[in-house]
Structure formats: C-alpha cells, structure tokens
Amino acid sequence: MSVFVSYRRVDADAALIVYGWLRDRFGRDGVFWDAEDIPASAPWASEIRESVRSAAALVVVIGPGWAELRNDDGSVRLESEDDWVRREVMLALEIGLPIFPVVSPGAELPSEASLPEELRGLLASEAIFMDELKARRKVLDALEQRVPVEVEPQLEDRTLDRLRWLLERQVQRLQIRGVELVQEGHADRAREELEEGSQLLLELVALTPMNLQTSAQLGYLYGSMADTLDKAGDEAGSHRYVDLARAVFSDLIERVEELIQSDEAPDAYELRTATNVAASSLNGLGAVLRRRGRLSEAIDIYRKVVALAPRYAYAWHDLVAVLLDSAAAGDVRVEEMIAAVVTLKQVVPGHPGISAEHLAGIEQRVRKWAMHESGQAIAAGDGRLARAHLDAVEEAFGDAPDLGLMRDLIRRQGG
C-alpha cells in the first residue's frame, strides 16, 4: 500500500517538496509518483491506473491555476478525457480512495464552480496549505492512519554514498553559478542552470531520503530561482519561488526541533549537524523574508541565527544588510547596526565572498547612518541621544574630525 502523488508537470517544484516529506516517512516503496516509478517499458496508462487502484491514499498537489489550465486548443484540461490529473482524481473518487489536496504556495483551493461536476468530490477532504505552519506534520498525520510506515534499510554502499556526495556538490555548483549569472545580468542562462539543479535533486531524492542538508539545498535553489525570475521581470513566478523556499526552510526548522526534542536524544555529531542546518535554514528563511520586504520579521530571524551560531559570518553579514534596508525604509537602529558590523569584522576573516573592500563599504554605510541619526537628534534638541550615537561610532570605528564637529554642536545647544 502506497501514497499516490498526483501533480501537473508545471507544479513539479512543489511536488518535489511533498514527495520528500512522504519519502522520508513512508520509504521509497511507500510513495508513487510517475516521474520516477513507471518503468520506461511499462504501458503508461495501465501502470497509472493500477497504481491508483492499489494505493492507500491519493495526494493531489494543487498549484496556481490548477483548475483553469488550458490545452493548446483553448479547452480546459480538467474537462479533457485524456488529462491524466483528471483521470487520477476520478478513479480515486470512483473507488472511494481517500484524497488529500495539498495546495502549493501562491495557489488557491479551486472553488466548486471551477471544477467539473464529476471532480467536485475532491473538495470533500480538508485541504492542507504548504505555506501553513507544520504543513508537513499535518500531511503525515493525515496519512499515517492509512499508510504503513516503512523503515528503509540504511544501505552500506560506498558507491551510493559517493554518488550522493557528487550530486550534492554539483547541485551546489549549479546554484552558485546561477547566482553569479543573475549578478552578471544573464537571467535566462541562470534559470537553465537552476532548473538543471532541480532535476539533479529529483534524481538524488530518488536514490535516498531527503535529509536535512538536501532539503536546505532545495530551499536555497528555490531562493535563487526567485531572484532569477525577478531579474527576468516575472514577478508572479518570483513570488511563487520565494514562497516555496519559505515552505522548505520553515519545514526544516520544524524537523530540527523535532529531532532535538525527540525521546531518543541525538548524539553530539547529530546535534551539531542539526544545529548547523537549523542556522542555515533560518538564515535562508531570513533571506526569503527580506526579498518579500518583510524587514522586521527578517531581522528577528537573523537575531535567532546569530544567537544559535555566534560565529556564522554570513548570518552577521545578512543581519547588517537587512538593518541597512530597514534604515533606508525609515526604521534606523543605530546601536544594533554598529554592534552587528563590529561582530562581523571579528568573525569574517577566512570566509570567501566577503572581501575587505566589501566590508569597508558596509562599515561606511553604517557609519553614515549613525552620523545622520546623530544630526537628526541634534536638530530635535536631543543632545543625550546624539552623544550616545557618537560615542558608539567612536568606539566602533575610531575618532574622526566630523565627530568633534558634531560634539561642538551639542555643546553649543547646552546638551
């Protein structure tokens, strides 16, 4: 008995997340989806029908426009007799198979009026939204009552381990290359690299369960895809991948919390790995929130990251960056910016991607905001606040002539 995952190819990005959840819990033989499980030589139609009939439940991944997608001739896909999603859902309804709609980020559950009458039974089950808190847990809880949980054997296969490592490294290279191409203004080529990375992750998950590190890589890949689509002018596509990345990172954090709080306490290595993944995932979630302009939430997330991993240089860098964004938006947090950039300078040596020149530029921007806020405080007659800002600047960056000038202004005001 297995879970059958029904999805459209355009929603494969969300389906991969759901498949990872199910594969991790029910094992490879406990999950069926046609991208992987139909042998090339098998008659496709009969294989699909037989897999639905023998399943314990049907999970339907619903992406944006799932009910409105049209064929080349303009007809609605769900109304076409040869539409496989329609066939899968109809067969499940006919045989009384439990159906669980899982709605991907950026999508909505179809209304009854938008569905053909013969498919409206799909709405009888409560839908689970992937961008909800604990979405994975809700999906698994609903299915565990119907699907036997399978414990997959741990394969002692050095060739498989080596292949997994190589695939993970290649996905990471493609993700980094995608970021570089975006920065160089080549959004189309970046998208090709990232889509290839997504396909490699699909192959990787087919080999072994989606572990914490692989899930984190998927989140970063989707975050990079969001940047790529944004540069290409596809705002809707960019928002969708931002939401997918958030779903991945939010779930990762929940999984790490479950591991740490489980009855079987993790050993030192597992705990260190889980902590690193949690910090990385939180940092990824902070980046997602920053992309959406939710700066206060992003700042709160980055504070959690640096509390969890005090020497995580990239997290300190991102915290300073989002504090600068916040300042530009009118919320200037002088002392926190200065403290963050001071710590960044302490932990950054040896970390690639943060050059001395780049760091100097960040320091200059933070100092500029601190001096600006000092001037604002002086103009408002608040010499005490202005002096506090100036003292923080001097302690962090050293004395300079402009500090003396500002202090003279405070004295003239009697502050």
Image (cartoon, rainbow, N blue to C red):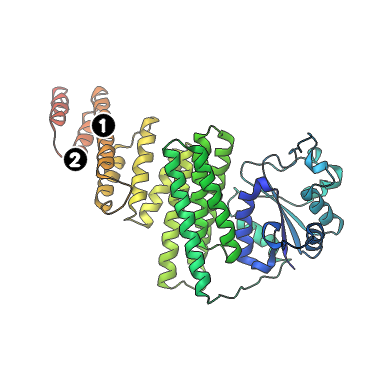
Q: In x, y percent, where is residue 293?
A: 47, 36
Judging depth in this view, the residue of 381 and 342 nearest the camera is 342
Residue at the image position 59 percent from the left and 66 percent from the top: 207
Judging depth in this view, the residue of 265 and 118 nearest the camera is 118
CB within 8 Å, label 2 to label 1 = no
Judging depth in this view, the residue of 77 and 186 nearest the camera is 186
Q: Which mark is residue 135?
A: none
Between the residue at mark 2 and the residue at mark 1, the CA separation in whole angstroms equals 11 Å
In the visual, does 411 lie left or right of 372?
left
Q: In x, y percent, where is residue 321?
A: 36, 40
Q: Which residue is mark 2?
A: 397
Q: Which residue is mark 1?
A: 368
- The local secondary structure at tag 2 comes to helix
Q: In x, y percent, where is residue 10?
A: 66, 45
Query: Can residue 73 be seen in this snapshot?
Result: yes
- In the figure, 137 relative to 107: above or below? below
Residue at the image position 78 percent from the left and 58 percent from the top: 44
In the visual, does 321 lie left or right of 158?
left
In the visual, does 150 lie left or right of 78?
left
* Quadrant of the snapshot with the C terminus: top left
Q: In x, y percent, where is residue 156?
A: 53, 77
Query: Can residue 213 be seen in this snapshot?
Result: no
